[in-house]
Amino acid sequence: MNLIVGLGNPEEKYKKNRHNVGFMIIDALLGEFPHTSINKNNFKGQLYKHRDILLLKPMTYMNLSGQSVRAVSDYFEPEKIIVIHDDLDLEMGVLRFKYGGGNGGHNGLRSIDEYIGKDYLRVRIGIGKPKDKDKIISHVLSDFSLLQKEELQDIINSAKEASLALLSQDLAKVAQKYTMKIK
């Protein structure tokens, strides 16, 4: 069993926010193949299964994502965990991959690190950083611009393919093929 986690915030008002790009990619993956929903309150998230792949959208809000990841990990003991998340330190349209490491100030990653450690793969989706550091929170919790929305589907498609490739291929091979800058 393998687990792919998309980070985001529940509630309709956050649905199209930059911070919810992980949820967007999970939704795109769910549109690709038949799946079943696994409903257990202690998972604190929306969990789906396709063959040996679990897809999770934590419903704990970003800052507590680790609670959901831990609950699902403890129950299913996945071989691999892949976390898809937004990354302020990458320009919009940049797609990068990483195993372990620091959280870069990302509260969702900080929470996951706290609950399960740092031994998981990451699909990092660049959302850019505002010049004014006081506007970081409003930046991540705002929707993509009209121009960015045009690029977003290419980013989602590439991240979706790369996430599936990480289940069976080496990180370096996937990174070589999918590391990109849209446009």
Image (cartoon, helix red, strand yellow):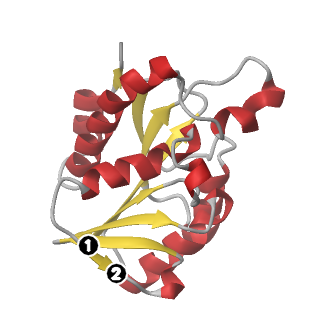
* Residue 52 occupies quadrant: bottom left
Q: Amino acid at mark 1?
A: Lys
Say which mark, if any, is on residue 98.
none
Which quarter of the figure is the N terminus placed in? bottom left
The picture places residue 36, in percent across and down from the top left corner, at 24, 75
Position of 143 relative to 110 (above/below): above
Q: State the SS at label 1.
A: strand
Tell me the distance, in whole angstroms, between the alpha carbons under discs 2 and 1. Answer: 7 Å
Say which mark, if any, is on residue 38.
2
Position of 2 relative to 155 (above/below): below
Residue at 55% x, 68% y is 59
Residue 30 seen by the camera: yes
Q: State the SS at label 2.
A: strand
The residue labelled by disc 1 is 49
Q: Amino acid at mark 2?
A: Ile
* Residue 104 occupies quadrant: top right
Position of 86 relative to 3 (above/below): above
Say which of 25 and 178 sits in front. 25
